[in-house]
């Protein structure tokens, strides 16, 4: 006789415990432990033996990717949406997920069904009118996933937008809409519909306070592509980033600007961030960072003022505060700058967050520029700073230099990467922070 054993498995993180508990000891979610019967080891397998196939003999039925009509979006997903695939689009509330999805459905050259569980048909119409007056689009304002999937079965559109997965409700699943059980079952049902009928789905998902997609982590494993729409809510630009892609790379990003008539693709993002409103003042330095495979020029501003209290302030916006502390220490030790009686404020213009060390040297020079009250003009500064004051290599230096040339800069201070660039820009390759300081 086969002995069986009961265990409890968390539906969120798959953690197993021998006893039922209200809260999963691993991921901390409540009410997610479900009973499972486990057969004891070494039993006779009851399934019918299945045969593996030789991969070389497999024929691929290639379906053309669906071009969404929004170039930046297509590029990010790897050249259009693959038929029958599931794309998850996450982002903070109010960032523009619904706007992007609606715009995409009005532009795409395929039969689309736009399903919204968050807005009424007339609300969708209002938004659609703002974006494009002459449009035709099938919309469904509904939260019952059974009803929606029946409609999809009957209508067989090529692309379906689900806004959002947290509002969808399945009769046969337990829990409240947006809960772990509901979301998991909903995506399972959607996946079945997608693979059976070769329908692509773009599913909008909410994110938590910490910036992760709400709901079970398994959600991200289930879908083919995960996209995030990011940006500061009160700044105009939005960045579309791909964090998982079964049908392409994850290093492309799309840049948009939120305008009166929806999201507008930004073909030359550097221009947007540098803008016409920057002025020549001490403390302002331009740097080049990478966003995916594209170089992007950004303005970094530093302001120093003598501190009135014993402990000097270090305040940042768009730049890591610990990194600033580290750079301040390098500046005092390696450049002999006394910063102990200076407050330092660093700001990245445009609301972008820099998480690349390649901006180190620019931040350091911005601080020096502010302290010495000397203006750094027409120069782009690139390089990572090491603790001993050495300027370290950065990847894709040539791309950054080309971007600087495109925008009319005349000089570059950068590390000693091997480069084959021959152009108009004067390049100062430096080995140390002290060397870089000679140029300003
Ligand atoms: P929305 O797409 O509703 O965000 P999400 O679905 O991610 O929650 O975005 C709404 C914001 O975008 C809202 O604050 C207003 C702004 N917006 C514009 O600035 N211009 C427009 O043309 C549209 C449609 C929205
Ligand atoms: Mg929305």
Image (cartoon, rainbow, N blue to C red):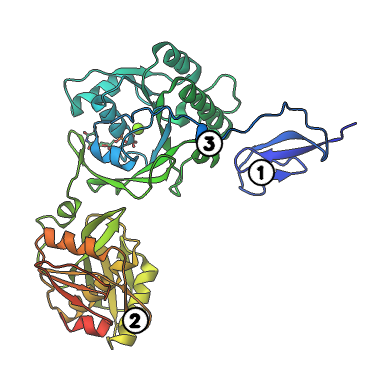
333 versus 51 height, above or below? below
Residue drawn at 22 percent across, 55 percent down = 350
Q: Residue at x 38, y 47 (%)?
A: 250
Give yes or no for contact between labels 3 and 2 (Cβ–Cβ under 8 Å).
no
Cβ atoms at labels 1 and 3 below 8 Å apart: no
Q: Give the SS element for disc 2.
A: helix
Q: Nearer the viewer, residue 19 or 379?
A: 379
Q: Please give the label number shown on residue 330.
A: 2
Whole-percent x and y of residue 254?
27, 45
Q: Is mark 2 within 8 Å of ligand 1?
A: no
In the displayed structure, would residue 31 be above or below residue 369? above
Q: CA distance from mark 1 to mark 3?
A: 44 Å
Q: Which class describes the residues within 10 Å of circle 3: few (<14), some (14-19), or many (20+)? A: few
Question: Marks 2 and 1, Cα distance to the nearest angstrom?
Answer: 47 Å
Quarter of the displayed picture in which ligand 1 can be seen: top left
Quadrant that contains the C terminus: bottom left
Q: Nearest the camera: 329 or 343?
A: 329
Q: Is residue 338 left or right of residue 200?
A: left
Of 127 and 41, nearer the camera is: 41
Q: Check disc 1 and report its element: helix, strand or loop.
A: loop
Look at the picture and state if 309 lies above or below 420.
below
Q: Which residue is mark 1?
A: 23
Image coords of residue 244 (percent x, y): 43, 44
Q: Position of residue 79 (x, y in %)?
A: 31, 38
- 129 versus 280 height, above or below: above
Residue at horizontal 20 percent and vertical 82 percent from the top? 437
CA distance for labels 3 and 2: 56 Å
Which residue carries the number 3 mark?
55
């Amino acid at each position: 006789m086969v002995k069986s054993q009961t265990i409890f498995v968390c539906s969120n993180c798959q953690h197993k415990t021998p006893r039922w508990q209200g809260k999963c000891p691993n991921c901390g979610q409540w009410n997610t432990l479900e009973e499972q019967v486990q057969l004891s080891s070494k039993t006779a397998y009851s399934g019918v033996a299945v045969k593996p196939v030789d991969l070389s003999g497999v024929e691929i039925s290639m379906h053309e990717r669906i071009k969404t009509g929004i170039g930046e979006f297509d590029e990010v997903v790897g050249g259009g949406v693959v038929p029958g695939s599931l794309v998850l689009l996450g982002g903070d509330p109010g960032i523009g997920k619904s706007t992007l999805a609606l715009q995409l459905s009005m532009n795409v050259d395929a039969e689309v069904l736009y399903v919204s569980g968050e807005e009424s048909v007339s609300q969708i119409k209002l938004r659609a009118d703002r974006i494009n007056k002459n449009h035709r689009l099938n919309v469904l304002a509904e939260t019952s996933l059974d009803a929606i999937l029946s409609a999809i079965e009957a209508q067989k559109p090529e692309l379906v937008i689900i806004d959002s997965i947290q509002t969808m409700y399945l009769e046969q699943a337990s829990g409240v809409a947006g809960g772990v059980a509901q979301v998991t079952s909903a995506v399972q049902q959607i996946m079945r519909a997608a693979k059976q009928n070769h329908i692509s789905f773009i599913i909008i998902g909410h994110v938590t306070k910490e910036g992760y997609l709400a709901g079970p982590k398994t959600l991200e494993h289930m879908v083919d592509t995960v996209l995030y729409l990011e940006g500061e809510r009160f700044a105009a630009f939005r960045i579309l980033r791909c964090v998982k892609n079964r049908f392409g790379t994850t290093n492309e990003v799309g840049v948009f600007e939120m305008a009166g008539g929806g999201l507008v693709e930004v073909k030359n993002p550097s221009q947007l961030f540098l803008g016409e409103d920057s002025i020549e003042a001490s403390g302002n330095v331009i740097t080049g960072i990478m966003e995916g495979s594209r170089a992007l020029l950004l303005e970094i501003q530093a302001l120093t003022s003598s501190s009135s209290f014993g402990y000097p302030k270090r305040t940042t916006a768009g730049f890591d505060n610990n990194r600033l502390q580290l750079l301040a220490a390098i500046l005092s030790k390696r450049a002999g700058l006394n910063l102990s009686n200076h407050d330092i404020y660093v700001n990245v213009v445009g609301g972008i967050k820099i998480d690349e060390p390649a901006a180190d040297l620019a931040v350091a020079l911005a601080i020096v520029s502010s302290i010495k009250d000397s203006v750094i003009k027409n120069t782009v500064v690139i390089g990572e700073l090491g603790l001993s004051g050495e300027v370290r290599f950065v990847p894709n230096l040539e791309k950054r230099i080309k971007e600087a040339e495109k925008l009319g800069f005349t000089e570059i201070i950068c590390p000693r990467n091997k480069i084959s660039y021959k152009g108009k820009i004067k390049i100062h390759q430096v080995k140390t922070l002290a060397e870089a300081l000679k140029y300003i």
